[in-house]
Image (spheres, helix red, strand yellow):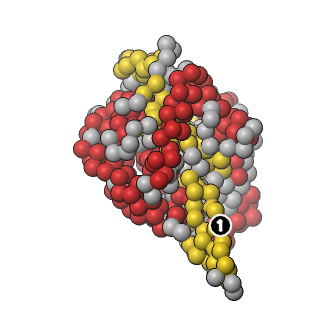
């Protein structure tokens, strides 16, 4: 396996206990540049294999993921606190997707022919060259694969930096892919933000990044100097609008499940719930009853519904937001205090009467908090509140009037909208971050094409 190292290191800590899992050497500037140079040298031969052969080679990744599924699930649980069952489901789901995604990539990148009188043009799609893949910790298997698979299949080589919170999980994914592809087609570098910045500034052609909006902005600024191509999947502050005529049980389940799953550490989590005033009291009761069942504990414990937050720093951010909201007049319905003992746990927390101007209504929380506000029941107010954010990743609306649901969904400024269900598109649709939630797309025909540039070759006929 090709891995670069330097004298600085990551302290890889178990968020359930705070104990050291491993000390991981990081790549410094020279190591990053060397990694990019190796990927650059390997790229022409990888591209020359052709689309069909590259996809055939990459199909072996599914077997590698299946063989190491239990190991990967254990690593994800130890490194970021994900429930062991959720980690295994993530791995199994993306293992099944490998074959389907490679077929989709071949469809997306297949040459196209256009004809006019006396002229024939073939449109082919060319790889950018070397792609820097910088991936997050919250879905430590799925998120890397959504970038690595399409980038490699398109004929790019990749320098891969997994999150510093899940270095061993990232390393295992790299090993699985490296066992299938020629040497230096995928090069792994470890490190935190400094290493990522060096990688973006290096002699690469494209950045595929999933992470925070602030980091995405820094990447965009750095990449702009040489007009490097970008796909950025950033954060969200996703609203859930609930009208009084909705199925309140279903809406409450959506609010709780998608505010608390993965301990709230989901880019498209429900972070703002707007309930029509006349239904606020019964809805709050339903939410509280459901949230009370979300016991936190070690991810290896079968009765846990939430693990810890990924780090002490992340928990401190959640604590600060909740405390600030209560100080500013929000009502603490349940939770809201750190438990005693080791680990970076935080209980399922429900806030009510959250005001529009409060910080928690605007800043991404990324923690296990259900935030309840009310609105007057008009479509206009529902849309205004839902769109009162610079983000635009996802949105949800529940109503008994399907026509109204369609009208509200059409006006929500978000890449994915769910009507009477949680958001999420059918297979084949891209994952889109509108406004400041992203730049470019991942997944689907449109997303796979982001890792190429179209080239027209014309001749007389």
Residue 388 is situated, as x and y percent measured from the top left of the image, at: 73, 51
Q: Dot 1 surroundings within 10 Å: few (below 14), some, or many (20 or more)?
A: some
Which quadrant holds the N terminus? Answer: top left
Residue 315 visible within the image: no
Judging depth in this view, the residue of 423 and 291 nearest the camera is 423
Tell me the element at label 1.
strand
Asked if 278 appears above or below 88 in the picture, the reply is below
Judging depth in this view, the residue of 95 and 48 nearest the camera is 48
Residue situated furthest top in the rendering: 7
Q: Number of numbered discs present?
A: 1
Residue at numbered disc 1 = 456
User: Residue drawn 72% across and 44% down?
Assistant: 227
Residue 3 visible within the image: yes
Asked if 249 appears above or below 334 in the picture, the reply is below
Judging depth in this view, the residue of 45 and 250 nearest the camera is 45
Which quadrant holds the C terminus? Answer: bottom right
**Is 305 on the left-hand or right-hand side of 282?**
left
Asked if 413 appears above or below 232 in the picture, the reply is below
Residue 10 is situated, as x and y percent measured from the top left of the image, at: 47, 20
Residue situated furthest front in the rendering: 460
User: Residue drawn 46% across and 47% down?
Assistant: 45
**Is 78 on the left-hand or right-hand side of 48?**
left
Residue 212 is situated, as x and y percent measured from the top left of the image, at: 61, 38
User: Residue drawn 49% across and 13% down?
Assistant: 7
């Amino acid at each position: 396996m090709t891995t670069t190292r330097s004298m600085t290191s990551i302290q890889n800590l178990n968020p359930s206990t705070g104990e050291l899992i491993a000390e991981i050497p990081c790549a410094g500037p020279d190591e990053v540049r060397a990694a990019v140079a190796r990927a650059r040298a390997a790229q022409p031969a990888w591209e020359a294999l052709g689309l069909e052969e590259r996809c055939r080679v990459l199909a072996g990744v599914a077997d590698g993921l299946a063989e190491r599924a239990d190991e990967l699930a254990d690593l994800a649980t130890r490194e970021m606190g994900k429930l062991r069952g959720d980690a295994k489901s993530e791995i199994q789901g993306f293992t099944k997707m490998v074959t389907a995604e490679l077929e989709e990539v071949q469809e997306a990148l297949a040459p196209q022919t256009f004809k006019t009188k006396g002229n024939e043009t073939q449109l082919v799609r060319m790889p950018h060259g070397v792609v820097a893949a910088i991936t997050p910790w919250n879905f430590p298997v799925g998120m890397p694969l959504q970038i690595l698979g399409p980038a490699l299949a398109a004929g790019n080589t990749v320098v891969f930096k997994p999150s510093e919170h899940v270095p061993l999980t990232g390393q295992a994914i790299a090993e699985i892919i490296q066992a299938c592809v020629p040497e230096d087609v995928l090069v792994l570098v470890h490190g935190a933000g400094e290493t990522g910045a060096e990688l973006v500034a290096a002699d690469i052609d494209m950045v595929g990044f999933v992470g925070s909006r602030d980091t995405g902005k820094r990447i965009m600024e750095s990449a702009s100097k040489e007009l490097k191509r970008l796909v950025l999947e950033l954060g969200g502050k996703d609203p859930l609008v609930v009208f009084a005529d909705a199925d309140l049980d279903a809406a409450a389940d959506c609010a709780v499940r998608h505010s608390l799953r993965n301990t709230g550490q989901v880019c498209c989590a429900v972070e703002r719930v707007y309930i029509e005033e006349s239904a606020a009291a019964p809805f709050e009761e339903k939410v509280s009853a459901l949230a009370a069942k979300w016991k936190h504990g070690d991810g290896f414990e079968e009765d846990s519904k939430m693990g810890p937050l990924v780090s002490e720093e992340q928990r401190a951010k959640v604590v600060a937001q909740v405390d600030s909201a209560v100080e500013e007049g929000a009502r603490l319905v349940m939770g809201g205090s750190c438990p005693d003992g080791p680990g970076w746990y935080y209980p399922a927390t429900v806030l009510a009467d959250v005001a529009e101007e409060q910080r928690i209504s605007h800043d991404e929380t990324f923690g296990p908090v259900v935030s309840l506000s009310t609105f007057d029941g008009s479509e206009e107010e529902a849309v205004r509140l839902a769109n009162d954010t610079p983000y635009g990743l996802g949105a949800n609306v529940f109503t008994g009037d399907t026509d109204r649901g369609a009208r509200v969904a059409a006006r929500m400024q978000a890449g994915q909208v769910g009507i009477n269900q949680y958001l999420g598109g059918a297979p084949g649709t891209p994952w889109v971050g509108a406004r400041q939630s992203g730049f470019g797309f991942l997944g689907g025909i449109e997303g796979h094409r982001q890792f190429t540039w179209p080239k027209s070759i014309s001749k007389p006929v």
